[in-house]
Structures are given as C-alpha cells and as structure tokens.
Image (spheres, rainbow, N blue to C red):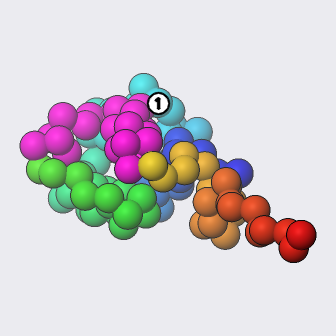
Amino acid sequence: MATVFDRVKSIVVDQLGVDPNEVTPEASFVDDLGADSLDVVELVMALEEEFETEIPDEDAEKIATVGEAVRYIEEHLLAAGKPLEVEEGGEPATKAQPERPS
C-alpha cells in the first residue's frame, strides 16, 4: 500500500532528482532539497494531478516542507472522502466488496 507520504516522496524524487533518503517530513523543498520557484510550481502541479485535487496558490505558498504537503493533502483527501492509501496500481486501498447472491 502506498501512503500519502510515499506518493509525495516519489513525486519529489522524480521532480527534483534528489536522493530518496533526503526526502523526510522535515525536509524543506527550497532549503534542503534545492528547489527553485519553478520547481515548487511544478511540484504543486504534480501533487494536484496525483491526488486529483486543487491546491490554491495561497495554500501552496504556505507549504514549505514535505510534511506540510503530506498533512495538507491528507486533510483534503479526508474532507473529500477519498482514501489515504492506494494499491500499487493506483487503486484505492478500500474497495467496496462485491455483493454476494442470496
């Protein structure tokens, strides 16, 4: 199962080309991971696509660390009734069980 952190970490590694071990909840996108302003915009866009949500500019400006991004996304997924974990193929971890014939 891929958690929100796992998915955010994967995006950060892909977008910024950093070592996965550097991507911790405390890591700052700019100060620790070397992102510039364009990188941050691209990260936000990638997160929006991955989690099928919109992150308004005023909210994006407040997200400085990996942990803040994870918390923001978790809060918005929960508010929207979406699962926090997904199977490796991107399917929600909590699938509805098929009804059994009586």
Looking at the image, is 4 positioned above or below residue 25?
below
Q: Position of residue 33 (x, y in %)?
A: 37, 41
Q: Which residue sits furthest front? A: 102
Looking at the image, is 46 positioned above or below residue 73?
below
Q: Is residue 25 visible?
A: yes
Tell me the crowding category of disc 1: few under 14, some 14 to 19, or many 20 or more residues within 10 angstroms, Cα based.
some
SS type, badge 1: loop
**Residue placed under numbered mark 1 in the picture:** 25
| For residue 44, side relative to residue 4 (left or right) | left
Nearest the eye: 38 or 5: 5
- Magenta residues? 58-80
Nearest the eye: 102 or 30: 102
| For residue 5, side relative to residue 78 (left or right) | right
Is residue 63 shown in magenta? yes
Nearest the eye: 53 or 99: 99
Which quarter of the image is occupied by the C terminus? bottom right
Q: Position of residue 15 (x, y in %)?
A: 39, 60
